[in-house]
Image (cartoon, rainbow, N blue to C red):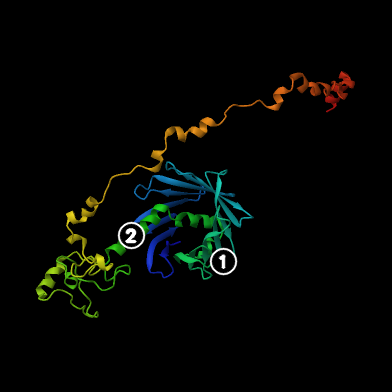
Amino acid sequence: MTESVITEFTGSQRESISRVYHYSPSGVRVLDKHDVTRRLYRFDPSSNTITENDPAQPGKILRRFVFDNYGMLEETFSFGSAPRTFRYEAGGRQIVMREGGDYGAVGKTFSFEGSGVAETAFGRDGSIERVYVFDPRNETITIRRGGWYGDVDRQLVFERLDVSVFCEPEAFLQFLIFSEKSDRETEAEIDEQVQKIRASAPGQSRYAYSGPRHTSDDTGRSGGVSAERSPMQPPLPSRGPPGRSPSGRAAARDDPGIDFIPDADSSRDLPRGPPGARVQSTAIPIEERFRSMRDEDQTLTTGRSASIPLDERFRSSREEDRTLTKGRSASIPLEERFQNEEKDRDELTPGRSTQISYEERRKGSRLK
């Protein structure tokens, strides 16, 4: 058997290759888009196990997967990683994954259906997390998010290997092992896409600002920003002061290229507001700003409560009678209170069990 190749694409367009799998009878090598080996799996048919080895040190085992008639047990050798167990249920048409061993909490379930496998995360009210769709032509496995008609997350194209090989539960577990993505790998792919967007030119990125850019000459500012305009865009009307030469425009192109709202802080236009506020605050001297505060009388006046004497304030509280009176129950003697309770007391009578002899009781315990 020659080495088979499985190419993994991100999305449904088959344009961006994320990983490449080299599948052979001895194991699987997982390469990234730069042809760098990221994972290494080795098969051991004699012991019915699969080991994940360190690509930098092939002799170092990172994980071991032990297969039996009931499923698969994952053994991890990294600190802080809990093992997982995959068990066959429902006559082999369902795989239940437990975190922490055979008696751990149920993490996910994989249900085999007509055209693929549905993965359901435990605790989501039975909603499907992703679906593995098998191509009837035995060429691709499509992984969709959210259900059978969800968005395509990944596509795996097979060469010199049929998709039907992984339709059985034991073979599907093998496929699930070497095709899964860790959280670190997912975050690395997202960071790489972000770096591509940030490194692209403003005119090429779909997230960049594509509107008209204003220069310092358009607003009359002494220091501003400028940007080269496209030949297809009409020229902006010049709003600068008269006598501005084209050499001044060329000198303003050394600015960093940050857009701003034109005429937002221009000193040529009057500020908005009522007629009394037509003067800019920068032109008002500090003495004139605080003149009204000095002219106003800032002396604090006493309140009306200060004219009420203290004796008058607390007179009502002193005049009230605060003496506590005895209740009606204090006039009833103690003998009269407990007289009825002594009359109602019944004499204790022996129970029915006293009529049963001790020998008869022991005889019944022996029979039991």
Residue 294 is marked as none
Residue 9 x, y percent position in the rendering: 41, 65
Q: Earlier in the sequence, mark 2 or mark 1?
A: 1
Q: Amino acid at mark 2?
A: Glu
Determine which residue is flagged by label 2. 192
Point 27% across, 63% down: residue:
199
| Along the line of sight, the residue nearer the viewer: 295 or 212 | 295
Residue 305 x, y percent position in the rendering: 41, 40
Point 70% across, 27% down: residue:
328
**Element type where label 2 sits in the image:** helix
Say if 347 sits above or below 38 in the image.
above
Q: Tag count in the figure? A: 2
- Classify residue 137 as left or right of residue 364: left
Quarter of the C terminus within the rendering: top right
Determine which residue is flagged by label 1. 115
| Along the line of sight, the residue nearer the viewer: 175 or 320 | 320
Point 25% across, 65% down: residue:
277
Say if 244 sits above or below 38 in the image.
below
Residue 134 x, y percent position in the rendering: 52, 66
- Classify residue 210 as left or right of residue 357: left
